[in-house]
Image (spheres, rainbow, N blue to C red):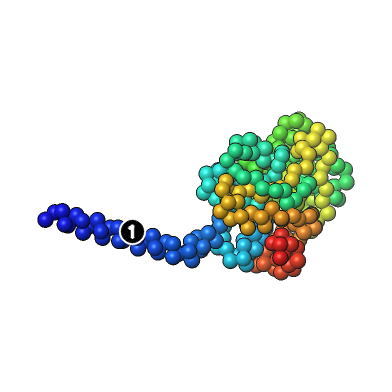
Amino acid sequence: MKKPFFILSLILTLFLAACGNGNNNEGSGEGEEQNKKVSMAMMSWIDNISTAYLWKEILEQEGYEVEMLELDKAAMWTGLSRGDIDLSSQAWLPLSDQSLYQEYQDTIDFGETWYEGTKLGLVVPEYMTDMNSIEDLSAQADTFNSEIVGIDPGSSLMELTSQTIERYGLTNLNLVESSEAAMLTELKKAYDAEQPVVVTLWNPHWIFAEMDLKYLEDPENTYGDPDNIQFMARQGFSEDHPEVYEWMTNWEMNDDQLGSLIKEVENASSHQEGAQQWVENNRELVDGWLNK
């Protein structure tokens, strides 16, 4: 009696399995939906947010579902390396992200450069006419409370600034850890009152279109030569989503284009709305990336 029951159970199992396989295949629709899902990681800096939401908007217009993940830099690179994240719009190379690149160069796919000639350094308002070089900082420290207003701890810019303080012997200065938003708040408060202030900043950044600012000269070149920005993908992404990878390979922006994107996203009621408006205003440029 057990043998017929076993045979019946086996037949039922095979039948259910066949049905399941049939559903999955027939689910070329379901499979296509799955293949239209992309995860995009970004950091909390407005330039990174802007380019991430730019691609969210573009991909959603092309029928993709995009999951946005806000992470710190180390978590973002680790996630890409493990294949837990599909894309990130920004790697600053060869200098700013050098240490992370050395660690993950064999486990992340580094895409094409889309922006050339970044800049990092210490920035002051143009009205600080007696302050033109990093070498001037120590002697005038009292005028800006002996503080350099920084951004997120652990960022490449903060690491380079710590090295700069040591290299120039700026022992009477304190590097204040904060965030991009907090740094910009302090900069604006000082700028509106025409008070001395020193901050860590970078290009591309929308704030240079809003204020008359200048980089302090860096005779020791501690901030290094300009970087380029390229996108990153998990390994295998280009095979899974060849059209997306091709679109991002075609992606190029100059300083004016990127600056206008950042400003649009920063000033909009939501990041998505800002990216959408920018895409509408730059349809021909975007269509060129998409080969339309």
Q: Which residue is mark 1?
A: 17
* Quadrant location, the C terminus: bottom right
Label 1: which secondary element: helix
Quadrant of residue 154 within the rendered picture: top right
Q: Residue furthest right?
A: 129
What percent of the width, then of the height, locates residue 43?
A: 62, 51
Q: Is residue 53 visible?
A: no
* Quadrant location, the N terminus: bottom left
Q: Is residue 71 above or below residue 140?
A: below
72 left or right of 135 in image: left
**Residue lying at 35% horizontally and 63% vertically, measured from the top left:** 19
Quadrant of residue 268 within the rendered picture: bottom right
**Residue lying at 56% horizontally and 48% vertically, measured from the top left:** 236
Number of marks drawn: 1
Depth check, front residue: 207 or 43: 43
Q: Is residue 258 above or below residue 229?
A: below
What percent of the width, then of the height, locates residue 50?
A: 67, 58
15 left or right of 279 in image: left
What percent of the width, then of the height, locates residue 123?
A: 78, 46
288 left or right of 39 in image: right
**Residue lying at 42% horizontally and 61% vertically, measured from the top left:** 24
Mark 1 crowdedness (10 Å alpha carbons): few <14, some 14-19, many ≥20: few
**Residue lying at 86% horizontally and 42% vertically, measured from the top left:** 132
What percent of the width, then of the height, locates residue 267?
A: 70, 64
Depth check, front residue: 287 or 217: 287
Q: Residue furthest left?
A: 1
Depth check, front residue: 220 or 245: 245
What type is the residue that disc 1 sits on?
A: Ala
Q: Is residue 247 above or below residue 277?
A: above
31 left or right of 199 in image: left
